[in-house]
Image (spheres, rainbow, N blue to C red):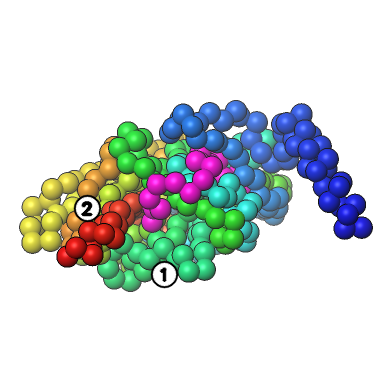
Amino acid sequence: MKLNSIVLGLPMVVSAATLNTKQNVRVGAPTEKLVATMRPEAKRAYFTFGPYELKGNPTAGKASGGHGHSGSSGGGMGGMGGMGGMGGEGDTQSFSLKTTGEKLCAPCSVLSGQIKFAYANGTLTSTERGIYVHHVLTNVLANGRQRSGFVSGLMGLMANGFVGAGDDNGNTPFIYAPRDRSLESGFHVNAADTLGANIVLVNYRPEPQTVYLNYDLEYMPSIWGRDVKSSLLSAAFGAMKTSRDGPVNTTSSPITFSEDGSMILAKGHLHDGGSAMYMSLSRSKDTTPYYTCVSRATYGGKIGGTDQETISDMTDCNKAPVEIKKGDNMVMTAEYDLKAHPLRGITGGGEGGTMGMFRVIFAPAPQPAKELKGEE
Ligand SMILES: [Cu+2]
């Protein structure tokens, strides 16, 4: 029996591979061809999970644009608007995924990644088709390789965030290496790493829908370069300030970096109603910023069956890595403008909550060589 499986093992693997290339279609994987863009020697592929079966939504089409309401202002949604909002609002359906790095590209260093939902036939889902991606939060952890945070305080405890999506940022990839290739970094994934994802979706259609989650990953097929850390940092705990009269700001206290490194990417995260996330960086004893940037919300696309315009993307804050010194301070501001863009109307009534965050991807500075330490 054992011998048999050893002998038979090889032909079976080969035939499976042949089948894969022959068909070249996996249930739930988008049919769009992928081309590596970060580095010529990189690979790119879809990693597909699911199916996730969404119940039909009997109140679909009755979603009220937030502007019609007077009773539930942004402030009134306080309990839902903050971190609690990640768990979902009244009309969301949640799923969880637990797997290992083996089911991704391990051993590999992910250079960029993007979430793509598709139907069984590979057609991408969209808000127009009634699939609203509230959140996909992915964490990748390894025993003994927890990514400690790179800022001090509660928000900086963990930095394990892997490719995710929000209602606002599905249209462009997260990058773990600079596009200008000025330094070598990636999100390291080993076979034994555990991947956990919290998937929160809304079905804006009356009939059930079945979807598949795809990680579109571009990666180096080895452990390569600096291992990045990735954290979601919030302008405030709880809801952001909002007003129906125009733009209002919520500004954070200074958030202090706890190590040297390079900020590879900063990308804002807002909910519908938000217009921009601002960031400024200053050296520890200096209040004059050495770096400022803005990540703006782009609105586009309607939610299926409603007249609600929703955020389709956020611009990247930085175009090139920013050199960070331990002790530097970051201050961020979330701007909401309900006059320009109402809060998301929840199917069956009510309004979505608010968030104001930055996803920050950080490559720690290389450790000084050991012999240098010895000479000290
Ligand atoms: Cu959010």
Q: Residue at x 53, y 28 (%)?
A: 35
Q: Is residue 109 left or right of residue 98?
A: left
Q: Position of residue 10 (x, y in %)?
A: 80, 43
Residue 239 in the figure: left or right of residue 4? left
Q: Nearer the viewer, residue 74 or 11?
A: 11
List x then y, in percent, for residue 249. 23, 55
Residue 91 in view, yes or no: no
The amino acid type found where label 2 is placed reads: Ile
- The residue tagged 2 is 324
The part of the chain drawn in magenta is: 213-229
- Expressed as whole percent of the image width and height from the top left, the position of residue 342 reads 39, 48
Task: Examine the residues drawn in magenta and state their main secondary structure.
Answer: strand
> What amino acid is found at the position of numbered circle 1 in the picture?
Gly
| Other residues around mark 1 within 10 Å, as few (<14) / some (14–19) / many (≥20) | few
Tell me, for residue 79, which label it has, or none: 1
> Who's the residue at 44% across and 60% down the image?
160
Give the mark count: 2
Image quadrant in which the C terminus is located: bottom left
The quarter holding residue 319 reads top left
Disc 1 CB within 8 Å of nearest ligand 1 atom: no
Q: Nearer the viewer, residue 109 or 357?
A: 109
Q: Secondary structure at mark 1?
A: helix
